[in-house]
Image (spheres, coloured by chain):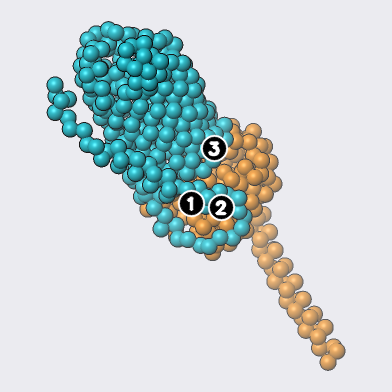
Chain colours: A cyan, B orange
Amino acid sequence: MSSKSFVRPPPARRLLAAACFAIFVCSAPQVAAQELSDLQADEPVETVEPDNRVTGGKLLLTAGVSQIEGAGGGGLTPWALIGGYGESSQFGASAFYTRVDVDDYSLDSYGALVGFHDRIELSVSRQVFDTEAVGAALGLGRGFEIRQDTLGVKVKLFGDAILEQDRWLPQVSLGVQRKRNDRGALVRAIGADSDSGTDVYLSATKLYLSQGVLVNGTLRYTEANQFGILGFGGDRRDGHSLQFEGSVAYLLNRTLAVGAEYRTKPDNLNIATEDDVWDVFLAWTPNRHVALTVAYVDLGNIVIRDRQRGVYASLQVGF
Amino acid sequence: MRHTIPTFLRSAAVLIAGTVFMAASSLAAAQSTPQPVERTPGAADPAPVHAELAGVFEDFGGRAGLDALMDEFMTILLADPRMRPFFEKVEHDRVKRQLAEQFCAILGGGCVYTGRDMVEAHGAHRIDRADFNALVEDLQIAMNRRGIPFRAQNKLLAVLAPMHREVINR
């Protein structure tokens, strides 16, 4: 209906690819420089005025990684932290590629984000869901794919997650994710109301440094089925509902964190039940330009397959 | 001719010895009566004692460990292009001593911090959050090189981090 009037901008995909490529290219020499300066930290280097630096002001790990829908956060859930390593007078950016490989399906996600003045974060990403053999079983064809594009905005409202260690108050951010998938006819056929939808979320994040623990809680107001892969709204339940997402990360050292996440989801479709998802992860940021996350993830039931568990791996590059 | 050089050396030696003695005695006098200096009105205590962190003080190797940490820290600060402009012109020995005193006092080690409050101590510099974080990072590298356990590092950093309110001034 209303989605018919949606004109898909073909340059969006190319723009996204170009942005990812640009961030990667910009990051590569910085990665080399950073590693060099780490190795040669006790050798004299040329003086640079600190005022000239336009990025890289945040502490390691405090930019988070890129969550599955492209926002700065953990793997499954957005955090209140603004992505990229730009501090309050700087900017930062990152690009990511994530692969989730569970028993009967796989999901690839890639995208980029830009953070301005540690205040506003803009993100763009694409999720590609591969039905593998299930596609054939459903008569869609083996390896039938559903693609979804997500545009995100996040604004830091108040609080400070990292430096305000004598205050309990977390950093709180408000975000929006506008999603649209490319299989409108299919998702309506299985009972969804629309191929596009908007999630609104409120995230609260705090690092409890004495304990070495980072805690995040996110409330998401959404009507997305399976993140939006199976459309929005449904024949069992239509309209938005409030969902909860939580992350806990334990810092092992300056570059390494382990943790777990849990995300509840709506259950809007009659065709299949939709479960909550969780993961346990290990994130490694050797420097401000590379972050590698591996996780064991449980996506629960997806259409005709139960207990979809497997591996999550994500690479982020940026500054 | 052969006597003039030793004469010159003697007077030079006397002069140097005298200077060293005066410097040493004034330093000793200063150290024997450590007094916290006047604070900016409204400024927070720059060295709040956390007696519960006495175990962390041991992890840092006591006062001797903190002195060694500051040698490492200053070396890293001066090699860091982000931090060198702030530290190259200061008296390194004084800053190292006062930082060791400050950390020692905070960690319940019984030292008296003789430096200025955080507003006063940083007033001559324009410092933003990126600068503050860069210093934290260098301190983390120094603590790692000294083999200080990560959990102990974080317990100290958690006390230092709120000082950003008085250190950051732009």
Above or below B6: residue A275: above
Q: Residue at x 41, y 36 (%)?
A: A96
Q: CA distance from mark 2 to mark 1?
A: 12 Å
Residue carrying label 2: A37
Crowding near the residue tagged with mark 1, few <14, some 14–19, many ≥20 C-alpha atoms within 10 Å: few
For label 3, the SS is loop
Above or below A266: residue A54: below
Q: Chain of mark 1?
A: A
Q: Nearer the viewer, residue A224 or A229?
A: A229
Q: Position of residue A22 (x, y in %)?
A: 38, 47
Q: Chain of mark 2?
A: A
Q: Nearer the viewer, residue A154 or A33?
A: A33
Residue carrying label 3: A255
Q: Which dot, 1 or 3, sits closer to the camera?
A: 1
Q: How many marks?
A: 3
Q: Chain of mark 3?
A: A
Mark 3 or 2 closer to N-term? 2
Q: Position of residue A271 (x, y in %)?
A: 29, 8
- The circle drawn on residue A149 is none
Q: Residue at x 34, y 23 (%)?
A: A145
Q: Which dot, 2 or 1, sits closer to the camera?
A: 1
- The circle drawn on residue A29 is 1
Whether label 1 touches label 3, CB < 8 Å = no
